[in-house]
Amino acid sequence: MHLVCLGVVKRILWFLRRGPPECKLSALQISQLSKNLISLSGMLPSEFARQPRTLLDIEHWKATEFRQFLLYTGPVVLKKSMSKEMYEHFLTLTIGISILLEMDDE
């Protein structure tokens, strides 16, 4: 899980910020995503180790923040910012990791 968070999710977010044109979001979209993440701050349950930070601070995010983005906040804030195809790919990763985590609990 740690490798998925620090590797795959970090790379996805990096590509959304600074990647090739076919997957890069505009500065306005990045700003809106960051605002949406910040708006969730203080509204999350105490079980979450960290409150969301902006995408501009991604270099300082910890693995728990990437995991939280992948499993909880990402699907909410990305829905209106990405193309349908990209969003469905992100959801596929989210669901796959959720299934693997459930299997780990058994």
Image (cartoon, rainbow, N blue to C red):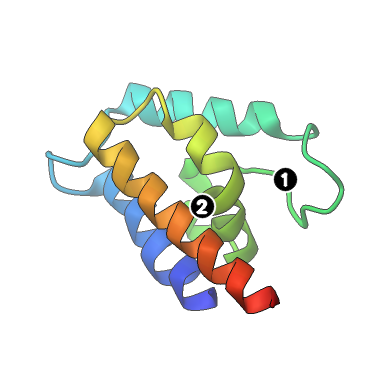
Identify residue for label 1: 51
Q: How many marks?
A: 2
- Circle 2 sits in a helix, a strand or a loop, which is it? helix
Residue type, numbered disc 1: Gln
Instruction: Using residue 76 as the reference point, say whether residue 14 is left or right of it.
Output: left
**Looking at the image, is 9 positioned above or below residue 17?**
below
State the mark number for residue 103. none
Q: Quadrant of the C terminus?
A: bottom right
Q: CA distance from mark 1 to mark 2?
A: 14 Å
Residue type, numbered disc 2: Leu
Q: Position of residue 13 (x, y in %)?
A: 38, 50
Callouts 1 and 2 close, C-beta under 8 Å: no
Q: Residue furthest right?
A: 46
Q: Measuring 34% from the left and 54% from the top, which residue is drawn there? A: 12
Q: Residue furthest front?
A: 106
Q: Position of residue 89 (x, y in %)?
A: 30, 47
Quadrant assignment, res 7: bottom left
Instruction: Using residue 21 as the reference point, say whether residue 92 is left or right of it.
Output: right
> Which is more N-terminal, label 2 or label 1?
1
Pointer 1 local density, CA inside 10 Å: few below 14, some 14–19, many at least 20 = some
Q: Position of residue 63 (x, y in %)?
A: 58, 67
User: Does residue 6 appear in this view?
Assistant: yes
**Looking at the image, is 42 positioned above or below residue 93?**
above
Identify residue for label 2: 70
Q: Position of residue 104 (x, y in %)?
A: 62, 77
> Of tags 1 and 2, which is closer to the observer?
2
Q: Measuring 32% from the left and 28% from the top, which residue is drawn there? A: 27
Instruction: Using residue 25 as the reference point, say whether residue 63 is left or right of it.
Output: right
Q: Measuring 54% from the left and 58% from the top, which residue is drawn there? A: 66
